[in-house]
Image: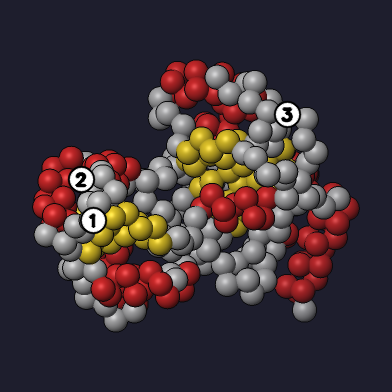
Amino acid sequence: MSRSSEPRGTLYVVGTPIGNLDDLSPRAVHVFAESELVACEDTRRTATILARHGLSTRMISYHKFNEARRLPEILRRLDRGERIALATDGGTPGISDPGALLVHAARRAGHRIIPVPGPSAVTALLSVAGLRTATFTFIGFPPHRKGERRRALEALRAEPRPLLFFESPQRLVATLGDVIEILGDRDAVLGREMTKIHEEFHAGPLSSIRAALSGLRVRGQVAFLVAGPGEDAPPAVAVVSAAGTGPAESTARRVRRLMESGVGRKEAMRRVARETGMSRRDVYSALLRDRTDAEE
């Protein structure tokens, strides 16, 4: 694009909440209101966000299965000088989500590209990790197939920086097992359902995190940060609610949840102690207090 050429349309790349709808910025609300069209990953999800702010901007779906087909239509609208907002189900488009193809094509066509920063699972997890993250390596979702995933992890053996992964609940335990086997039982922090009502964090050795999640039906979006080789363990991160109102699950309840899944009491206490950084004596005291409270 020559310097004298003027952009014909404007593509806004809008960061949207990864869970809590109150995290949508006032600027993003304004952009959605002023745009002629919102290209979004799931119109139902984005409709909920727009309705929360009294907006009814026209939407079209734009996701990994139709982005090549939708691209010409969106470019034609930009050619007419329209303002189009690009959004995904949560977070920032183009980061493990659709968006890069459209941004690249729109820039080549001479259109203006404007970022509207917003919530991010990456920065949310980094901010509470307690690890050295002046530099880190973003991995995103590892390959789905076990063989490909293990080869990708082998290529990361020499990486000295912390590694940040996304993973689906269905593959999480298997992926953690591969990471432990190939990279070692490093310290890590895992965030699940960040900013949502069932938000929780687990910190400690990867083996303790995997043990705490094994046998459970993990739900929601997951991100986890693995420390670089030789880094000290992070302080334990308590499980807290998205609203910040206090514990989402007591120590005693966490022990009982493991016991209900078939884990013996001593082993359940050991796992919770490693996961939270508490001593086994403190975990046992929490169990006694909880039982006493229930009997009163």
> Where does label 2 land, which residue?
109
Q: Secondary structure at mark 3?
A: loop
User: Reading the chain from its start, which is encountered first: label 3 or label 1?
Assistant: 1
- Of 154 and 296, the residue lying toward us: 154
Callout 2 environment at 10 Å: few (<14), some (14 to 19), or many (20+)?
Answer: some
**Which residue is located at x 16 percent, y 61 percent?**
81
Report which quarter residue 146 is drawn in.
top left
Discs 2, 1 touching: Cβ within 8 Å: no
Q: Which percent across, then down, holds residue 166?
A: 49, 42
> Where does label 1 land, which residue?
7
**Which residue is located at x 58 percent, y 23 percent?**
156
Specify the amino acid type for callout 3: Pro
Report which quarter residue 184 is drawn in.
top right
Rounded to the nearest whole Å, what is the CA distance between mark 2 and mark 1?
9 Å
Q: Is residue 284 left or right of residue 172?
A: right
Q: Which percent across, then down, holds residue 216?
A: 54, 46
Discs 3, 2 touching: Cβ within 8 Å: no
**Which residue is located at x 77 percent, y 79 percent?**
296
Which callout, 3 or 1, points to the residue nearer the camera? 1
User: Reading the chain from its start, which is encountered first: label 2 or label 1?
Assistant: 1
Q: Secondary structure at mark 2?
A: loop
Rounded to the nearest whole Å, what is the CA distance between mark 3 and mark 2?
44 Å
Callout 1 environment at 10 Å: few (<14), some (14 to 19), or many (20+)?
Answer: some
Q: Is residue 58 above or below residue 218?
A: below
Callout 3 environment at 10 Å: few (<14), some (14 to 19), or many (20+)?
Answer: some
Q: Is residue 6 visible?
A: yes
Q: Is residue 210 visible?
A: no
> Where does label 3 land, which residue?
229
Specify the amino acid type for callout 2: Ala
Specify the amino acid type for callout 1: Pro
